[in-house]
Image: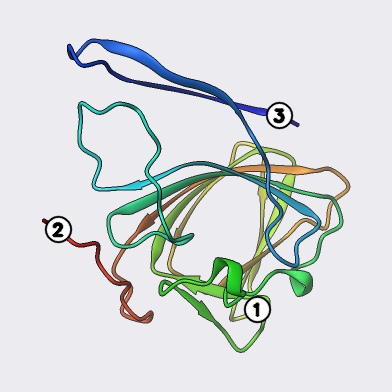
Amino acid sequence: MTMRRVVTAHNKEGRAVVASDVQLPAFQPPNRTDWSVYDVWAGEDPHFPDAGERAKVGWFFPPIAGFRYLHTLMEPQTRAEHAMPASDQKLKGPTAVKTEKSDMHRTATIDMVYVVKGSCMCELDDGATFQLNAGDTLIQGGAIHAWSNPFDEQCHILSVMIGAQNDLVEPPPQPDRE
């Protein structure tokens, strides 16, 4: 699958322009050959008008007021017990906390998740599981969770993570403000 991203912004005269129109590459999170993730956009402290350039960020899980927009494709028959722990080095950040169950994680983010196609399961640390289907939205408020797709169809998920204070997670360092 290819994903196109079109970004509008402003030129030096303050007029609206198409700043970029590109095909995004997918990446596979560590230990997840059954997922493809398109890292669509990220940033912190947006200020407009701007040139429409994507901020260069050094984190996966955003700091307070930072954000990330992802499109994730979960292959069929993927189980939570194979999920990548949040403590994995490539996605590690101060907002990610590994739990006793290595397939679960908690972040200092509020996540808005929308299932575009297919179905998936979300498991919470108390053992509760629930199914999300195409058209469903989940607001994930920093709870311990893991994802799986035990179904026969690929699952497409759009999600926005916004960095938030979570008293159960060590606060992330805040960007310098000058």
153 versus 94 height, above or below: above
Q: Are marks 2 and 1 in contact (CB under 8 Å)?
A: no
Q: Are marks 3 and 2 in contact (CB under 8 Å)?
A: no
Query: Is 145 placed left or right of 1 in the picture?
Result: left
Q: Which residue lies furthest to the left in this view?
A: 178
Quadrant position of the N terminus in the picture: top right
Residue located at (57% from left, 84% from top): 99
For label 2, the residue is 177
Q: Is mark 2 on a helix, strand or loop?
A: loop
- The percent coordinates of residue 150 (x first, y second) are 82, 58
For label 3, the residue is 2
For label 1, the residue is 127
**What's the CA distance linking mark 3 and mark 1?**
35 Å
The picture quadrant where one finds residue 31 is bottom right
User: In front here: 45 or 162?
Assistant: 45
- The percent coordinates of residue 175 (x first, y second) are 24, 62
Residue located at (60% from left, 36% from top): 135
Q: Earlier in the sequence, mark 3 or mark 1?
A: 3
